[in-house]
Image: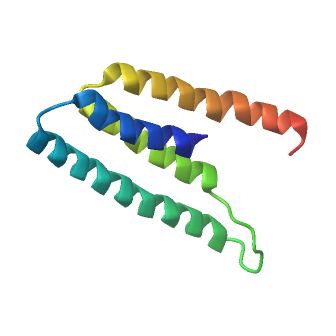
Amino acid sequence: MLVSLGAALFIMIPLAIGKNGNERDAIERVIQGVATGIGFLGAGEILRQSQQEIGEVEVHGLTSAAAIWVSAALGTAAGCGLWKLSLIGALMSLFVLRVIKELERRSGK
């Protein structure tokens, strides 16, 4: 859910800005760079978490990596002046991280 929210935010930002061609292209390239760089940061979080338990083939840190990625999208939206989009995304992120996680815990998974 967090990754899809982050992806949606990264797509909506250039659409909402709607500047002229050259300025919009520059903004889109910056957003692409941020999304790629944060992706590598999230991969490092997953690998770091997985390496702590050598011998097991479990993957850990996916939620942390997704939270890092969506926080980058929220920061990008806020930095572009889209505070309403950023606020809605932050509330949705809190819902996923708090409410959905609690429901998952109660279901025994």
Between 61 and 30, which is closer to the camera in this rendering? Answer: 30
Q: Residue furthest right?
A: 108
Q: Quadrant of the N terminus?
A: top right
Residue 80 in the image: state x and y as whole percent.
24, 32
Is 77 left or right of 97, judged from the image as shown? left
Above or below, 67 against 94 in this view is below
Left or right: 29 as drawn, with respect to 86: left
Relative vertical location of residue 50 with respect to residue 69 in this rendering, above or below: below
Pick whichever, 36 or 28, lies toward us.
28
> In terms of depth relative to the viewer, which is nearer, 45 or 91?
91
* Quadrant in the rendering for residue 96: top right
User: Residue pushed farthest bottom?
Assistant: 55
Relative side of 63 to 74, left or right? right
At 38% across and 41% down in the image, what residue appears? 10
Where residue 69 appears, x then y in whole percent? Answer: 46, 48
Residue occupying image coordinates x 29% and y 56%? 33
Vertical placement of residue 46 versus 69, above or below = below
- Where is residue 9? Give x, y as percent: 41, 36
Residue 59 percent coordinates (x, y):
69, 65
Numbered-mark total: 0
Q: Quadrant of residue 56?
A: bottom right
The residue lying furthest to the front in this view is 21
Residue visible at 29% across and 48% down in the picture: 31
Position of residue 72 relative to residue 80, above or below, is below
Q: Residue at x 36, y 19 (%)?
A: 84
